[in-house]
Image (cartoon, rainbow, N blue to C red):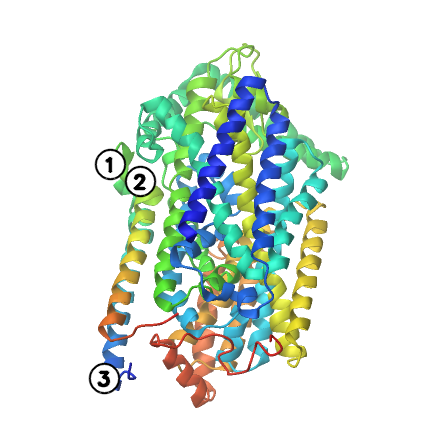
């Protein structure tokens, strides 16, 4: 049976089961918790079965899925590898809170694929190694470049991994009420079954299956809501009108007397809390509580438009001055970071040819595009629902989705001025994640769709965790152990070490995640700047400039990382500020430093040896009739495989 | 296939560099000018009910990125064939 048929059948079966659960819900009143359990068990079961079927111990299969993944499927795998718990659950909510400024994420996380397509993807495939540090090692002759690559890969991937594991725990605990840490470990079983048994091969096919669940579950609620409101099932077309309605309502809310009264009460709360903090003589714990209270009150006291006679609300306002600089800088860093993240780059080693690698980047972005151009629609619909269906209702007659989701602690409705009517300022958002999580209920869909959304969120978190885990384990076992410490290790020994490291890394990530450190979410955004400043300049120069040499690349990567890290830590903790740039856009300084350093240092030091220059030249022209496999330096990587 | 001659290599690479440059210019204009610096000004126009600047940042630019990569893959794969490069994976 062809791959297309297998995954087509799988999709039909999955939808069939979803419909069956829906029927069971309607006929027998299947309780929500059961539906949650069924979806979790079913999807984890699918991933485990794929893991078992595709198990392998052939090194080409284990590291790069035998370089046999067709473009379309690699595109889907990249899509789910890329779209994390944050893209699935948090992005729409962040957009609804930030408005235009939030679009930096939408553009940054898609536009990076153009850089990947023209600068890196096809050339890395032509080069044909196993990992990104492999390329650095071969191109910049020796272990130093490789080790810097390993350090950077782990720095980018590990915090990112913890965030995914945290995402798994949150989803499981929210939907089926399991304890957070038990949820984390349950999710890890799904991840480990795939990666340990079959490496890249299992991860690839699991990711394809995860993409299908992820995209279906993301689109269903918002497509249905669009159909309900406008009789057109294409939310991407209809939300233009929603934006206009929202804007008119935002201006109205800004001028409304009752709203002003409510905002004034919040303002008073904020001032009181701030005054108490200033007075001092309170312990740290109380001070933290007051700060949170002041922040919430300030947020609630802010009107949706800047003044009574404004023409557009804050939501649609395009930032200017420093705001615009930060918007552009963040977009740039996210784009370059996207093109530099090792767990994404390795996916293009798995296609059968350079041609397929090129086509595959196009498919990847198409599959990612489907979600990202829907996210702003989610945001607009969520805002619409609150404006049109919540604001103005009686406090005793709240809509169903509010009473259902309020206990989850994502938002609160308080009658601040005691008039019995819900004002916009009475709706206190604690986590914007409610936008995606509550959307099925908002649209009046049965709980089975909420269960589907849970399966989608789980798929998004697990698929990204899979890719990251493999990247980290390979960095330790293939790059550090095999290439640096013991090049004579047998294949069996290497694969055993990889498998042990996968389990250890997963357990460490889960253990760290159980501490619930708040800064983790923030660190994920840092990963993009780190990848942008370390990998991108060294990889691009290595492919596009023959003269780039070992010293240049090593000094350049370290300089790029150092400047970025300095600005990140400085701006986040010690008040350093260059042009008012925000912390997450730190690579806007590190990246140019990286490029210039590689260029200058390479020029003043010796040109790379002839074989390396020939290698750079050969990467430019796809070869006929010879698929490049194994090690570019000619060592027999499969020693001991037979 | 015989190896490409030096001349062929040069013209193959020149085509690639030109194509890459054009795509990057489009990428830059769409992202940083149309969806960035000029977005506020463009918002006075409306498209499908959207303010135009917002539309470009939320949907237009994304669609253009997808098309750009598809064009790149298509043209480069065609170029390979023209130069007799047929990989066997």
Residue highlighted by disc 2: B55
Task: Tell me the chain of label 3.
Answer: B
Task: Tell me the chain of label 2.
Answer: B
Residue highlighted by disc 1: B47
Distance, label 1 to label 3, CA atoms, is: 48 Å
Q: Residues within 10 Å of mark 1 (few under 14, many from 20)?
A: few
Q: Secondary structure at mark 1?
A: strand
Quadrant assignment, res A554: bottom right
Q: Examine the rendered structure and indicate whether residue A297 appears above or below residue A12.
A: above
Of callouts 2 and 1, the N-terminal one: 1
Q: Residues within 10 Å of mark 3 (few under 14, many from 20)?
A: few
Q: Secondary structure at mark 2?
A: helix
Q: Examine the rendered structure and indicate whether residue A312 appears above or below residue A570.
A: above
Of callouts 1 and 3, the N-terminal one: 3
Task: Tell me the chain of label 1.
Answer: B
**In the image, which is nearer the foreground, mark 3 or mark 2?**
3
Q: Tell whether A369 sits left or right of A149.
A: left
Residue highlighted by disc 3: B7
Q: Examine the rendered structure and indicate whether residue A275 appears above or below residue A618.
A: above
Q: Position of residue A291 (x, y in %)?
A: 65, 35
Q: Tell whether A379 sits left or right of A200.
A: left
Q: Are marks 2 and 1 on the same chain?
A: yes
Q: Position of residue A490 (x, y in %)?
A: 66, 77
Q: Write the residue at 42% across / 31% down.
A: A222
Q: Write the residue at 41% across / 53% down.
A: A2
């Amino acid at each position: 049976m062809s791959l297309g048929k297998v995954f087509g059948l799988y999709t039909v079966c999955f939808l069939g089961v979803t419909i069956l659960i829906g029927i069971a819900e309607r006929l027998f009143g299947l309780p929500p918790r059961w539906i949650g359990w069924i979806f979790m068990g079913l999807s984890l079961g699918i991933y485990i079965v794929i893991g078992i079927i595709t198990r392998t111990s052939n090194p080409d299969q284990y590291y790069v899925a035998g370089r046999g993944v067709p473009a379309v499927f690699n595109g889907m795998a990249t899509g789910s590898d890329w779209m994390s718990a944050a893209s699935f659950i948090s992005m729409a909510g962040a957009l609804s809170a930030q408005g235009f400024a939030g679009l930096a994420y939408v553009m940054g996380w898609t536009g990076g694929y153009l850089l990947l397509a023209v600068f890196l993807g096809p050339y890395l495939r032509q080069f044909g190694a196993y990992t990104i540090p492999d390329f650095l090692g071969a191109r910049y002759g020796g272990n130093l470049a490789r080790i810097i690559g390993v350090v950077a890969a782990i720095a980018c991937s590990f915090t990112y991994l913890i965030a995914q594991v945290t995402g798994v725990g949150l989803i499981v605990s929210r939907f089926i009420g399991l304890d957070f840490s038990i949820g984390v470990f349950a999710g890890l079983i799904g991840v480990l079954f795939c990666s340990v048994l079959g490496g890249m091969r299992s991860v690839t096919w699991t990711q394809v299956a995860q993409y299908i669940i992820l995209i279906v579950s993301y689109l269903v609620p918002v497509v249905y809501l669009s159909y309900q409101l406008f009789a057109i099932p294409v939310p991407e077309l209809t939300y233009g009108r929603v934006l206009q309605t929202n804007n008119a309502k935002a201006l109205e809310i800004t001028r409304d007397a009752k709203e002003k009264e409510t905002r004034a009460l919040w303002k008073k709360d904020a001032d009181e809390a701030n005054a108490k903090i200033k007075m001092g003589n309170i312990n740290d714990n109380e001070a933290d509580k007051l700060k949170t209270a002041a922040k919430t009150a300030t947020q609630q006291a802010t009107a949706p438009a800047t003044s009574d006679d404004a023409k557009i609300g804050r939501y649609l306002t395009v930032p200017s001055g420093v705001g615009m600089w930060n918007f552009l800088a963040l977009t740039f860093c996210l784009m370059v970071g996207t093109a530099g993240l090792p767990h994404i780059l390795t996916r293009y080693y798995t296609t059968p040819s350079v041609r397929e690698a090129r086509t595959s980047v196009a498919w990847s972005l198409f599959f990612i595009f489907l979600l990202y151009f829907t996210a702003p629609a989610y945001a607009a619909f969520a805002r619409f629902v609150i404006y049109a269906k919540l604001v103005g209702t009686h406090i005793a007659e709240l809509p169903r989705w509010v009473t259902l989701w309020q206990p989850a602690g994502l938002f609160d409705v308080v009658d601040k001025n005691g008039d019995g009517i819900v004002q916009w300022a009475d709706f206190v958002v604690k986590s914007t994640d409610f936008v995606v999580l509550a959307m099925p209920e908002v649209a009046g869909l049965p709980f089975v769709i909420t269960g589907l959304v849970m399966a989608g969120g789980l798929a998004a978190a697990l698929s990204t965790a899979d890719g990251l885990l493999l990247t980290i384990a390979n960095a330790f076992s293939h790059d550090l152990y095999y290439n640096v410490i013991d090049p004579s290790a047998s294949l069996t020994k290497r694969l055993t070490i990889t498998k042990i490291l996968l389990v250890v890394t997963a357990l460490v990530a889960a253990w760290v995640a159980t501490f619930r450190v708040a800064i983790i979410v923030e660190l994920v955004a840092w990963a993009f700047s780190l990848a942008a400043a370390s990998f991108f300049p060294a990889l691009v120069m290595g492919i596009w400039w023959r003269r780039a040499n070992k010293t240049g690349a090593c000094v350049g990567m370290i300089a790029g990382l150092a400047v970025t890290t300095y600005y990140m830590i400085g701006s986040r903790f010690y008040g350093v500020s260059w042009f008012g740039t925000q912390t997450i856009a730190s690579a806007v300084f590190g990246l140019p430093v990286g490029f210039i350093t590689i260029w200058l240092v390479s020029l003043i030091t010796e040109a790379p040896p002839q074989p390396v220059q020939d290698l750079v030249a050969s990467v430019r022209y796809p070869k006929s009739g010879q698929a490049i496999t194994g090690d570019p330096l000619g060592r027999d990587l499969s020693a001991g495989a037979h | 296939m015989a190896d490409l001659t030096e001349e062929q290599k040069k013209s193959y690479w020149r085509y690639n560099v030109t194509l890459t440059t054009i795509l990057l210019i489009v990428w830059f204009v769409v992202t940083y000018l149309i969806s960035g610096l000029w977005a506020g000004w463009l918002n006075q126009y409306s498209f499908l009910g959207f303010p135009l600047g917002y539309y470009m940042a939320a949907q237009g630019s994304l669609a253009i990125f997808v098309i750009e990569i598809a064009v790149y893959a298509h043209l480069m794969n065609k170029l390979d064939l023209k130069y007799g490069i047929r990989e066997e994976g």
